[in-house]
Image (tube, helix red, strand yellow):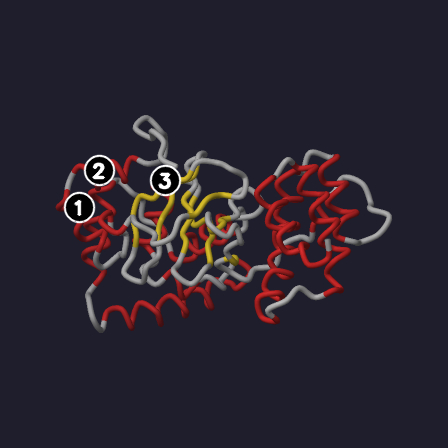
């Protein structure tokens, strides 16, 4: 879904790249933000229904999307996705400042300065064997008006952005409606921990019903989609739906209907057909 971002804050660097191919070249190589690779290869959508605009890609088949609030969502070609910046400018700060950022996804501020710098230096030493990135980084930062930040600060920015991926920015395959996996493995709070009141039990459906009642619509939707994906995958591997899933499917259908999510409710109904 395309939308007009001409006057949006936080994407000045993107406008500069689009206007000047001399800047777009080094952004594409060695920093792997290629304006000519914005085609993702499969149709995708956000579970929340929010707008999504592909703006660039990389040489591994990954795509950078801009969401309605300006956040940048990166989706790789293997079915994983995550927010990597609150704005395009911030995402480009990460990509240019950490050209090996995909090898730093597991890092967080809790790892400390020494460990972060050791990892970044190790990754960049491998990159420098093929291309001296330092001069390009300095020049591109200056041309785009991006500040010079330390690797430790950039890792902190990336970590903070990744943790915002769910629930608002869960990416789905637009044809089968299954969810992409998270790009990182950092711990997140369980749905029950987000609730304003203590649930009487920890069952998924007790928690999703309470989440709906408390206005945590997207958190409930994400939990249900993830549960449905597990059942769907199990059915695919067995070439049949497990009878033990029948009761859960009925409740999943009911919860999606309560959310007004006809696509996911229909997907669950199709899996429930053998039991109907």
The residue that appears at 44% across and 34% down in the rendered structure is 68
Quarter placement of the N terminus: top left
- The residue mark sitting in front, 3 or 1, is 3
Disc 3 versus disc 1: distance between alpha carbons?
21 Å
Image coordinates of residue 63 in percent, x first then y, are 35, 52
**Dot 3 or dot 2, earlier in sequence:** 2
Q: Are marks 2 and 1 in contact (CB under 8 Å)?
A: yes
Quickly name the residue at label 3.
53
- Residue 118 tag number: none
Quickly name the residue at label 2.
16
Q: Is residue 3 above or below residue 46?
A: above
Few, some or many C-alpha atoms within 10 Å of disc 1 (few <14, some 14-19, many ≥20)?
A: some
156 with respect to 233 (left or right):
left
Disc 3 versus disc 2: distance between alpha carbons?
17 Å
Image coordinates of residue 223 in percent, x first then y, are 65, 50
Disc 2 versus disc 1: distance between alpha carbons?
8 Å
Q: Is residue 211 above or below residue 268?
A: above
* Rendered image quadrant of residue 9: top left
181 with respect to 270 (left or right):
left
* Rendered image quadrant of residue 211: top right
Few, some or many C-alpha atoms within 10 Å of disc 2 (few <14, some 14-19, many ≥20)?
A: some
Pick out the residue farthest to the left: 22
Pick out the residue farthest to the right: 200
Secondary structure of the residue carrying numbered label 3: strand
Between 98 and 204, the residue placed more toward the observer is 204
Q: Are marks 3 and 1 in contact (CB under 8 Å)?
A: no
The residue that appears at 21% across and 42% down in the rendered structure is 17
Few, some or many C-alpha atoms within 10 Å of disc 3 (few <14, some 14-19, many ≥20)?
A: many
Quickly name the residue at label 1.
23
């Amino acid at each position: 879904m395309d939308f007009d971002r001409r006057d949006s804050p936080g994407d000045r660097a993107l406008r500069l790249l689009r206007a000047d191919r001399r800047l777009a070249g080094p952004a594409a190589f060695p920093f792997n933000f290629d304006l000519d690779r914005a085609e993702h290869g499969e149709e995708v959508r956000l579970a929340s229904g929010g707008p999504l605009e592909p703006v660039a890609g990389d040489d591994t088949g990954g795509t950078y999307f801009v969401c309605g609030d300006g956040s940048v969502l990166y989706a790789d070609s293997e079915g994983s996705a995550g927010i990597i910046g609150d704005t395009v400018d911030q995402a480009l700060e990460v990509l240019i400042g950490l050209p090996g950022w995909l090898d730093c996804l597991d890092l967080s501020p809790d790892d400390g300065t020494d460990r972060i710098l050791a990892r970044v230096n190790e990754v960049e030493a491998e990159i420098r064997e093929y291309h001296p990135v330092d001069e390009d980084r300095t020049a591109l930062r200056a041309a785009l008006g991006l500040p010079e930040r330390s690797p430790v600060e950039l890792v902190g920015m990336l970590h903070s952005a990744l943790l915002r991926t769910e629930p608002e920015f869960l990416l789905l395959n637009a044809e089968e409606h299954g969810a992409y996996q998270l790009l990182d493995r950092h711990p997140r709070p369980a749905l029950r921990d987000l609730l304003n009141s203590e649930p009487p039990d920890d069952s998924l459906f007790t928690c999703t019903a309470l989440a709906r009642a408390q206005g945590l619509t997207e958190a409930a939707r994400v939990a249900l989609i993830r549960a449905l994906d597990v059942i769907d995958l199990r059915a695919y591997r067995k070439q049949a739906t497990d009878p033990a899933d029948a009761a859960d499917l009925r409740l999943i259908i009911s919860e999606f209907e309560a959310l007004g999510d006809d696509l996911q409710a229909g997907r669950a109904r199709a899996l429930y057909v053998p039991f109907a």
